[in-house]
Image (cartoon, helix red, strand yellow):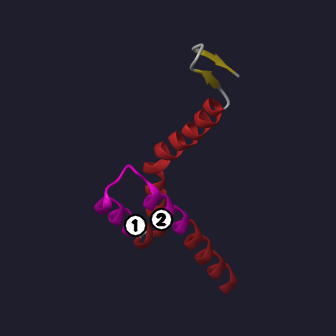
Amino acid sequence: MNNILYTSIIFISLINAYVSYKVLRSELYDKSQKVFQLLIIWFIPLFGMALVLFFLRDELASTSRKDKLYERDSEVSYDSATGSVGD
């Protein structure tokens, strides 16, 4: 019984740490909003983590899309002398 409790605490702590990291790296929120979200994450562990991830989902998706666009754009070359775009 204690093993299940300890495993659950460790699992929740790791997820909270991940979500806290994402909040701190987010460019959507100012400092006071980040502090408030961190308090929610750690004082209401499961619900707070889910709530903050819900709000961060758009930023996480857009970051993924930006990375893919950057990779695609970096593969395309542009010749400024002729004005042509090549692969």
Please tell me whether residue 80 is drawn above or below residue 67 in the rendered image. above
Query: Residue 66 appears at what percent x and percent y?
Result: 54, 38
The span picked out in magenta is 16-39
The quarter of the picture where residue 10 lies is bottom right
Is residue 8 in the magenta section?
Answer: no
* Residue 59 appearing in the image: yes
Q: Residue furthest front?
A: 81
Residue at x-position 43% and y-position 54%: 26
The foreground one among 42 and 62 is 62
Viewer-side residue, 85 vs 53: 85
Magenta stretch, overall SS: helix
User: In the figure, is residue 39 to the left or right of 25?
Assistant: left
Residue type at the position of mark 2: Ser
Q: Nearer the viewer, residue 46 or 1?
A: 46
**Label 1 SS:** helix
Which label number is shown at residue 20?
A: 2
Tags 2 and 1 touching, CB below 8 Å: yes
Q: Which mark is residue 38?
A: 1
Residue at image location 55% in from the left, 64% down from the top:
18
Query: Where, quadrant-wise, is the C terminus in this rendering?
Result: top right
Q: Nearer the viewer, residue 72 or 19?
A: 72
